[in-house]
């Protein structure tokens, strides 16, 4: 069974446990490896979003200037390195990045990548775009109040944005590819063309995606759901198992079940740091 997770959060973003507590839990599970991937969300128009009224209560997650976050993330990276020195485990520093497409974002992200010593990045898109250029964002809850047709356009845009993240080749793997199912409009059999197109793009770019047990914790299916996992495997997509742990007791959650599903669908391409 996979004995590591590269998709985890700490109190640095929206996790409930410290870096030290997450590392100690991984060690007590017998893991030799852990990746910490707190959120990296920087969008120039965050304070102008219709969802700002709630985002402003979470200043540790939402940022609108890359310049403002360098020091903060540098300290975080340093803390992870320092803490991990005391434990018999290799800890890598990553970030779960919301990929944006407005002019200038990618250049700023590339600069951050040069300046800070991250080991890896995960792509994880959590929002919808109100316009084609991705200049204006809104969260899923608030989007539900918009006309259905507009929601549908935004869902298609969401998938296109993830495809651009895949094509950028900047990410070790692509997280929760059917995250849009948070929207009531997006039941599992909806937007199948868009989902399949994304899977094909992942395969074509030789990229990796995750099977995340977070969906199971929420009382549902994996992210992505089993049908999409099967379709992705049939298209030759490589997988890594994630827990998207936000607390110590979520590390390794139901990895045995994820292993069962991957082997049932004959997944023979798995991702691990030594492979890349
Ligand atoms: Zn996420
Ligand atoms: Zn996450």
Image (tube, rainbow, N blue to C red):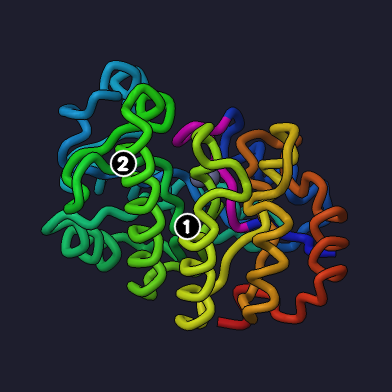
Q: Which residue is pictured at 26% across the width and 44% down the height?
A: 42
Nearer the observer, 221 or 259: 221
Q: Mark 1 or mark 2: which is in front?
A: 1
Magenta region:
6-15
Q: Is 120 a magenta residue?
A: no
Q: Where does label 2 land, which residue? A: 72
- Spatial separation of the CA atoms under disc 1 and disc 2: 14 Å
Decide if residue 73 is in sight here: yes
The residue singled out by tag 1 in the image is: 94
Q: SS class of the residue under badge 2?
A: helix
In this picture, residue 117 sits left or right of residue 106:
right
Q: Residue at x 46, y 65 (%)?
A: 120
- Image x and y of residue 25, in percent: 74, 42
> Is 12 included in the stretch rendered in magenta?
yes
Q: Quadrant of residue 113?
A: bottom left
Q: Residues within 10 Å of mark 1 (few under 14, many from 20)?
A: many
Q: Looking at this view, is 68 or 271 the one in front?
A: 271
Mark toward the start of the polypeptide (1 vs 2):
2
């Amino acid at each position: 069974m996979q004995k590591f997770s590269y998709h985890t959060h700490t109190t640095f973003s929206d996790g409930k446990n410290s870096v030290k507590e997450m590392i100690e839990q991984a060690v007590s599970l017998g893991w030799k490896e852990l990746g910490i991937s707190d959120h990296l969300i920087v969008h120039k128009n965050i304070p102008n979003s219709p969802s700002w009224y709630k985002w402003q209560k979470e200043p540790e997650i939402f940022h609108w200037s890359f310049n403002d976050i360098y020091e903060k993330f540098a300290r975080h990276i340093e803390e992870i390195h320092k803490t991990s020195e005391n434990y018999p485990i290799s800890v890598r520093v990553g970030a779960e990045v919301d990929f944006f497409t407005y002019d200038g974002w990618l250049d700023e992200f590339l600069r951050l990548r040069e300046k800070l010593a991250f080991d890896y990045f995960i792509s994880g898109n959590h929002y919808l775009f109100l316009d084609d250029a991705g200049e204006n964002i809104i969260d899923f809850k608030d989007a539900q109040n918009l006309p259905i047709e507009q929601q549908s356009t935004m869902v298609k845009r969401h998938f296109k944005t993830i495809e651009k993240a895949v094509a950028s080749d900047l990410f070790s793997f692509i997280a929760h590819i059917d995250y849009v199912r948070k929207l009531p409009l997006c039941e599992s059999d909806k937007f199948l063309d868009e989902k399949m197109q994304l899977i094909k793009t992942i395969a074509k770019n030789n990229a990796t995606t995750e099977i995340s047990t977070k969906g199971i914790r929420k009382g549902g299916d994996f992210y992505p759901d089993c049908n999409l996992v099967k379709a992705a495997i049939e298209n030759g997509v490589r997988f890594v198992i994630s827990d998207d742990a936000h607390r110590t007791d979520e590390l390794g959650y139901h990895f045995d079940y994820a292993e069962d599903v991957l082997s049932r669908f004959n997944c023979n391409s798995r991702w691990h740091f030594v492979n890349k």
